[in-house]
Amino acid sequence: NVLSPGDVIIDGGNTNFHDDVRRAAMLADRKIHYVDAGTSGGIWGLSEGYCLMVGGETDVCQRLEPVFRTLAPEHGYLHVGPHGSGHYVKMIHNGIEYGLMQAYAEGFDLLHQSDYKIDAAAVAELWRHGSVVRSWLLDLAARALTQDPDLSSLDAYVEDSGEGRWTVKEAIDRGVPLPAITAALFTRYGSRQDNPFAGRFLAALRNQFGGHAVKASTHDA
């Protein structure tokens, strides 16, 4: 009862694109327009501007373009297609983000464990300048490593907000191989397990077939 025909609802959250299509159709019956705006930029978007990936009717998006261009940096707004496409592009964006973060994490883990006592923060800062792997994520990594070189203030527990799962599910549904992103997602799952059953199972099997040594549990039963 609050909205009238011709009004527009903009969903700027991380919404599943299937829900966008359903909601747009439901609202169309009431002559209310729906726009899905995939939004990237995190907590820095307020000062740097938001990257906006927008899906919806062309004429409606054109009408809203001044709003989007105000929120976005230069070249940071695009009407990518019909209902659902904005959040679809954002979903894949976040899947790529998972893969990039995992690659950085693995590389810096190897640096951290090497015999060379390499200053990881200094390397991160070095790579920010002219290297092939420079990126905003690397900028943030350099900042984090400068603040806490061993990251000792953190536990190795990594949540996921859903878009990585949706990306992998979409890839499965379409038969598209996504090995790096899928591995990155599963690594996050693994980070939340303490003394996982699968690991104990593997140790038990090696002991059974080859008499290989096992490490006794220090966990409470």
Image (cartoon, helix red, strand yellow):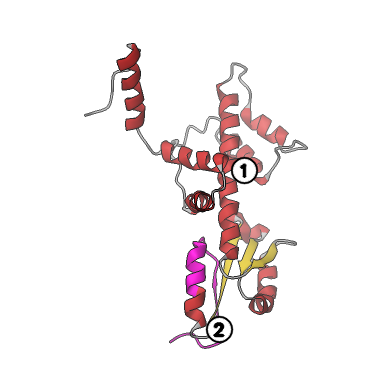
Name the N-terminal-most of marks 1 and 2: 2
Horizontal arrangement in the rendering, residue 202 relative to residue 179 (left or right): left
The image's mark for residue 72 is none
Is 124 or 38 nearer to us in this picture?
A: 38
- Report crowding for label 2: few under 14, some 14 to 19, many 20 or more residues within 10 A (C-alpha): some
Which amino acid is tagged 2?
Answer: Asp
Q: Is the C-beta separation of discs 1 and 2 under 8 Å? A: no
Horizontal arrangement in the rendering, residue 77 relative to residue 182 (left or right): right
Horizontal arrangement in the rendering, residue 44 relative to residue 29 (left or right): right
Residue 177: horizontal and vertical position, in percent?
56, 44
Residue holding disc 1: 140
Q: What stretch is highlighted in magenta?
A: 1-23
Q: Is residue 25 in view from this perspective?
A: yes
Residue 25: horizontal and vertical position, in percent?
50, 76
Q: In which quarter of the image is residue 87?
A: bottom right
Q: Is residue 173 magenta?
A: no
Which amino acid is tagged 1?
Answer: Leu
- Report crowding for label 1: few under 14, some 14 to 19, many 20 or more residues within 10 A (C-alpha): few
Q: Is residue 196 in view from this perspective?
A: no
Residue 208: horizontal and vertical position, in percent?
30, 16
Q: Tell me what residue is drawn at x 56 percent, y 35 percent.
A: 105
Residue holding disc 2: 7
User: Looking at the figure, which quarter contains the N terminus?
Assistant: bottom left
Q: Tell me what residue is drawn at x 59 percent, y 16 percent.
A: 115
Camera-nearest label, 1 or 2: 2
Residue 168: horizontal and vertical position, in percent?
51, 48
Q: Tell me what residue is drawn at x 60 percent, y 41 percent.
A: 100
